[in-house]
Image (tube, helix red, strand yellow):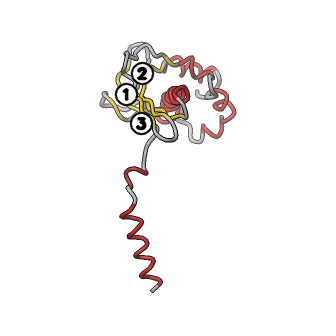
Amino acid sequence: MKKFLTIAFSIFLLTSTDINAQVFNRETIKCLGTELDGSVTLRVHGYGRNRADAKEQAMKNAVWAIVFNGVRDGVHGSPLRPIVTEVNAQERYADYFNIFFADNGEYKKYISLRDTKKFSAGRSKDKLGYDYYLTIRVLRSELKKRLQDDNVID
């Protein structure tokens, strides 16, 4: 009887919930192109409790992806490798990156919004906050030089 109730409850949960609605990636990033000056144009997603927070989160996601994750999706056939390839660099340099990625932090020096066209920002609102898709240019070569000067990378 206990086994029957467990199976019946499991079936009820699986049929009553939409699994696709529960899984949502808030860090969708696509490469739109690379420039000859070493900058990268990205289409980035951000989420926040208001519009300003969502836009700032999108900017942070863009720089974070260039520094730690790399960019796999996009126009070009070869993916962009991350600048920091050291294992556990996020934990090792946590104090540095907490200051670097603080609200209105140093990461904003390596972002340009000049590729953003009018009405190109996708936005939507749900019960908890705002979603924003922005076109952001990350100054990858300047960012790499900064990390080298600060002895984060070799």
Q: Secondary structure at mark 2?
A: strand
Residue 41 in the figure: left or right of residue 94: left
Kindly tell me whether residue 83 is visible in this rendering: no
Q: Residue at x 44, y 18 (%)?
A: 39
Q: Which residue is mark 3?
A: 28
Crowding at mark 1 (Cα within 10 Å: few <14, some 14-19, many 20+):
many
Q: CA distance from mark 1 to mark 3?
A: 10 Å
Label 2 is placed on what type of residue?
Val
Q: Residue at x 38, y 70 (%)?
A: 11
Who is closer to the viewer here, 131 or 97?
A: 131
Tag 2 near tag 3, CB within 8 Å:
no
Instruction: Judge depth for marks 2 and 3 and give the one in front.
Output: 3
Tag 1 near tag 2, CB within 8 Å:
yes
Which of the 4 quarters of the picture holds residue 5? bottom left
- In percent of width and height, residue 66 lies at 48, 29
Q: Which residue is mark 1?
A: 31
Q: Which residue is mark 2?
A: 40
Crowding at mark 2 (Cα within 10 Å: few <14, some 14-19, many 20+):
many
Label 1 is placed on what type of residue?
Cys
Q: Residue at x 57, y 17 (%)?
A: 109
Crowding at mark 3 (Cα within 10 Å: few <14, some 14-19, many 20+):
some
With respect to residue 4, does 153 lie above or below? Answer: above
Q: Earlier in the sequence, mark 1 or mark 2?
A: 1
Tag 1 near tag 3, CB within 8 Å:
no
Q: Secondary structure at mark 3?
A: loop
Residue found farthest to the right: 95
Q: In which quadrant is the N terminus drawn?
A: bottom left
Number of numbered discs overlaid on the protein picture? 3
Label 3 is placed on what type of residue?
Thr
Who is closer to the viewer here, 98 or 152?
A: 98
